[in-house]
Image: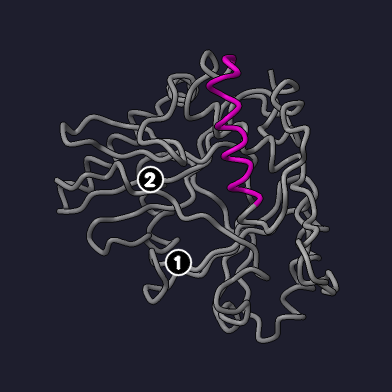
């Protein structure tokens, strides 16, 4: 039985930050999925076949996060059934999804009336990649697990047209954090090419470039990204340890810096105030 604790979801960047070029996304069928404002978690079975729930950075999420998942009717039983069924067919799954806690969302853009788990991808040991969306949807349907919806499937041949389409999609859907745009194809690492586009992130493709000598003056990381990083800290260490500033603040700075690096931004100097606000 394979150790699945190290299987983590890839970090997603924006279209303009794709390497080696944004043009690599052209000509692909793109699945536009709503990006829910929650915590990225994953379910898998350990070597003893016990159900485990990990956060983005930790093999085991905090007890608070697990309690939230356990409060969703039948979720843990249904997920366990899905993972055990995979073993009978000679495979093992890691189920990735968004865990929405009751109350204010991590970036405070919305409020949830009840906790939910929405599956958005699934890794299989058979191919060592993510399964196509159709398989994810089927497996979740059979196991009575909520699956992410696909808003639309598109294909683009010009970057300017793709950026225009992205802008219109965000404009038409102000009620969500943004979109994750995916192309499932075995030729890509982990079996998927994916980006995320959100309302609050700078559209780098629209910013004129005139970089002088010296240190670049990068835009500040948006508040929503900082609070999202703070929420990841809570997911990893739990509420009680988060109240200990000596434990929490180094992680807050670390996770915020990781987000800033991904988005080619900088973090504000008063990041401690964000920590206090969250408390």
User: Which image quarter is the C terminus in?
Assistant: top right
Measuring from the top left, give residue 30's x and y in whole percent. Answer: 58, 71
Which residue is nearer to you in this view: 14 or 113?
14
- N-terminal-most mark, 1 or 2: 2
Residue 67, placed above or below residue 95? above
Q: Is residue 108 magenta?
A: no
Location of residue 73 by image quarter: top left
Q: Magenta stretch containing residue 248, yes or no?
A: yes
Which quadrant is the N terminus positioned in? top left
**Identity of the residue drawn at 77% across and 40% down:** 268
227 and 68: which is toward the camera: 227
Please name the residue that numbered disc 2 is placed on: 95
Query: Residue 11 vs residue 188: left or right?
Result: right
Q: How many marks?
A: 2
Residue 177 screen position, x and y as percent: 71, 47
| Residue at 71% over, 81% down | 159
State the SS at label 1: strand
Magenta span: 243-260
**Could you tell me which residue is drawn at 24 percent across and 56 percent down?**
125
Residue 192 is tagged as 1
For the point 58% across and 58% down, the residue is 150
Q: Which mark is residue 94?
A: none
């Amino acid at each position: 039985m394979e150790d699945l604790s190290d299987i983590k979801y890839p970090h997603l960047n924006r279209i303009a930050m794709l390497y080696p070029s944004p043009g690599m996304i052209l000509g692909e069928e793109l699945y536009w999925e709503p990006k829910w404002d929650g915590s990225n978690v994953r379910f898998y079975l350990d070597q003893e076949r016990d159900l485990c729930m990990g956060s983005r950075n930790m093999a085991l999420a905090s007890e608070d996060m697990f309690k939230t998942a356990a409060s969703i009717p039948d979720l843990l039983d249904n997920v366990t059934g899905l993972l055990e069924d995979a073993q009978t067919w000679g495979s093992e799954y890691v189920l990735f999804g968004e865990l929405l806690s009751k109350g204010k969302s991590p970036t405070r853009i919305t409020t949830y009336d009840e906790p939910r788990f929405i599956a958005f991808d699934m890794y299989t040991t058979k191919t060592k990649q993510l399964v196509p969306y159709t398989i994810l949807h089927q497996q979740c349907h059979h196991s009575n697990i909520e699956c992410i919806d696909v808003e639309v499937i598109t294909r683009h041949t010009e970057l300017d047209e793709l950026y225009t389409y992205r802008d219109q999609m965000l404009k038409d859907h102000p009620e969500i954090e943004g979109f994750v745009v995916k192309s499932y194809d075995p030729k890509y690492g982990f079996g998927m090419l994916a980006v995320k586009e959100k309302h609050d992130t700078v559209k780098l493709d629209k910013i004129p470039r005139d970089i002088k000598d010296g240190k670049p003056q990068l835009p500040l990381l948006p508040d929503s990204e900082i609070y999202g990083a703070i929420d990841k800290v809570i997911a990893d260490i739990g509420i009680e340890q988060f109240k200990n500033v000596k434990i929490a603040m180094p992680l807050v700075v670390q996770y915020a810096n990781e987000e800033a690096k991904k988005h080619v931004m900088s973090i504000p100097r008063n990041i401690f105030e964000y920590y206090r606000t969250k408390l």
